[in-house]
Each structure stands twice: as structure tokens, then as C-alpha cells.
Image (spheres, grey):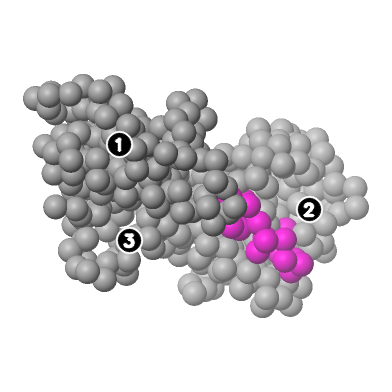
Amino acid sequence: MDDIIILGRIGEIALKGLNRSTFEGCLAKNMRKAIAECGKCSVNWSQSRYYITPEEENFNIDLAITKLTKVFGLTSVSKVHILETELQKMSDMACTLAKQQIEKFNQKGRTDVSFKIITKRGLKSFPMNSLEISSELGGNILDVYPKLRVDVNTPDFTIYVEVRESTYMYTEIIQAQGGMPVGSNGKACLLLSGGIDSPVAGYMVGKRGVTVNAIHFYSYPYTSERAKQKVFDLAEIISEYCGPVKVAVVPYTDIQLAIRDNCCPELGTVIMRRSMMRIAERYARRTGCSALITGESIGQVASQTIQAIYCTNEAAHMPIFRPLIAMDKIDTITIARKINTFEKSIEPYEDCCTIFTPKHPKTKPSLNEILEEEKKFDYETMEDTAYQNIIFE
């Protein structure tokens, strides 16, 4: 017996109590969806481990591993060989895995290669303990490949051995996303602008198990079709992690023009943000969301000072999640690069948040003056019209 499966590991889910099975089942469902195109397989779990077992010869195991690393809830995955718990078979497989690793390093011009073996013996009836198994297998490898050397601190490669009723052997632990499985912690609506911050905010809240919908405010002809397409592209990228992200598009030009023509320019951005929150909240409630998500960070721009955020918050009556609130821009960019949204986000197509921006926005607006400015145009009727004309694409 020498079958190859994928082993998945969980982290935070293992700390759950009586409702742990709910999270485990949700994760298994998400895993099956993520790898559905890879071929037929089974997904089972036991003792904080998930076992993805191919059920047909053409199952694409490498693609499945790539997709599983993007499933929230898994902390790592490995391609694992399963074999009989018999010392000679274990030794043969250890040598095979060592040979594969040696060839990889040789292709890179490396001839001085080091290794170590880490063994966990779960089968207590096996006559050797973990250290003895590692020593035996390591000695056999050195007999076959005498140019190898043992390095227990910084080896070039490690062979992992887990001895149970069957033995599991592998050489790589591939980091995944961690977090909680999407769908296990409610639903929220992301205000998706097309910049760097909002896709990262959606990713981060999705990582906590929240299903993410999105809403985009579109000001044609001041923003282009390319700008709108960029938003759809970003939603598609984060859907690799968060599951399908539906995007609703709000025709927002008339409201922005009304704010520009009737309100104090220095307060225009905050007034616009409040308007967006009201429309987004209506849409969120309509779609079963319990919170809004934005990419705001304290002090990043004038509309994100504490005073401005306070004024913006007052317009909504549901929680507003701001996962980037205390993050440096460099930290946000690091995550954006990691999840492959950065290059798309910096494409030079303006979104509605960047047009009609005042030269000298007020950084410490008061709620009273904002409310007085809002009286200067019929925002309720205009927002109702925009909401009624939301486009679903």
C-alpha cells in the first residue's frame, strides 16, 4: 500500500467547545467546493486533521493543494504518502523521499545537502519509540546516500513520519490561511472602492468566517467602465479566499454632483461617506447582512480622522467593521501583495471616492455642521432613487 492523500490541519477551530462540529462541517463543505474541479475525492476529518483522499486516477492533487491553501480555517496542508506500518516499507519510502529531495537540490547546483527526520509515534504497540524510528530511518538513508549529512537544527529538508495503524510520510508543510471557515460567522457587506484598502478589509473579515457581499458606488461618466471592471476583478480575486463575492453597483453620480453643488466643499467627503453608509446599510439589510466593512484607517486621509469617522458612524445603525483601522499602509500593502490584489488595485482608474476631492478638506468636522450641510439638498429622495436603481452584475 502506498497511497497519496492531502493532509489538512486546523488551528483555532480546535479550541471550540460543544459547537466545534459545526465549524468542522462548514470547513469540510468549503474544502469540497474549493477543489471540486480537481476531480473526485473524499473529505474526512478526525482529531484536528482533515484527510482529502483522491477517488480517481486523474485527480489533480497539486492544484487541489494550491486551492486548499486559500481556504479559511486550514492552517497548513501536506502531500502525504500512506503506507503499511512495517519498518522495511517505512525505510524504503524514506529513501524514496530523500532521493526526490536530493534531485531537487542537485538541479540547483547543490551537492552538500542536509536532512533530518521527525517522527511521531501514535501507535504505542509499535516496538520502537519516536527517536529510535528516526535513527533507524536516518541510518538507512545515509547507507543509500552517503553524501547526505544530518543537521537537526537547519536541515535542507525534513522527512516527517507519523506512525499509526498506517504510517504517514511527507516532506513539506505548506502554510494556509488559518482563521475560521467562511459561512460560520454571519454575513457582512463590503464597501468595495477599487483601491488598495477595501479588498484587504474584505479578505480580513472573511478570514474570521464572515460571508462577504460587496457594494460599489459608480459615478459615470466621471469614473470609467474600466474603473468599474477593476472592482469586479478585485471581487473575483478575493472570492478565491472568501467564496463567491456578489457585487452590487450603485449609480451615484447625481448624489455626488448635488453634494458638490450645494454643500461646503471642505465637508463634502464626509457628507458623501455618510450617504454611502446609508445606502449600503439598506442594501445590507436587504441581503441578510448584519454589518458593513470598510477599508478605513485612522488618519490615513482627511475623511478618516477620528472626528470624521465619528460623523460617518452616526449615519449607520449597524456595526461597521474596520479591520485596517490601526494598520500602517505598508502593512496593508503587504497583505494586498500576498492575496494578489495589489497590482489590480493600483491600476490608474479613478473611483468615485477620488473625484471632486476638496483641496483643503476639514479634518475635524463636527456632527452638527455636517447635519446642517445635509439640509441643503434632498439627500433622502436622491438616495432612495440610487438604491432603487442598484445594478446587480
User: What is the crowding at mark 3: few (fewer than 14 residues within 10 Å), some, or many (at least 20)?
Assistant: many
Q: Earlier in the sequence, mark 2 or mark 3?
A: 3
Q: Nearer the viewer, mark 3 or mark 1?
A: 1
Callout 1 amino acid: Asn
Identify the residue shown where x is 30% and y is 54%.
31
Q: Does any portion of residue 106 appear in the rendered image?
A: yes
Q: Nearer the viewer, mark 1 or mark 2?
A: 1
Query: Residue 380 appears at what percent x and percent y?
Result: 61, 59
Mark 3–mark 1 CB contact (< 8 Å): no
Identify the residue shown where x is 13% and y is 38%.
86
Q: Earlier in the sequence, mark 3 or mark 1?
A: 3
* Viewer-nearest residue: 151 or 335: 151
Query: Residue 24 appears at what percent x and percent y?
Result: 24, 42
Q: Earlier in the sequence, mark 1 or mark 2?
A: 1
Query: Residue 270 appears at what percent x and percent y?
Result: 73, 48
Mark drawn on residue 140: 1
Query: Residue 162 appears at what percent x and percent y?
Result: 24, 35
What residue is disc 2 on?
268
Mark drawn on residue 328: none
Please give the range of residues in magenta: 336-353
Mark 1–mark 2 CB contact (< 8 Å): no
Mark 2–mark 3 CB contact (< 8 Å): no
Residue 232, picture quadrant: bottom right
Cα separation between marks 1 and 2 = 74 Å
User: Helix or strand or loop: what does disc 1 sit on?
Assistant: helix
What residue is disc 3 on?
61
Q: Is residue 115 left or right of residue 97?
A: right
Cα separation between marks 2 and 3 = 53 Å
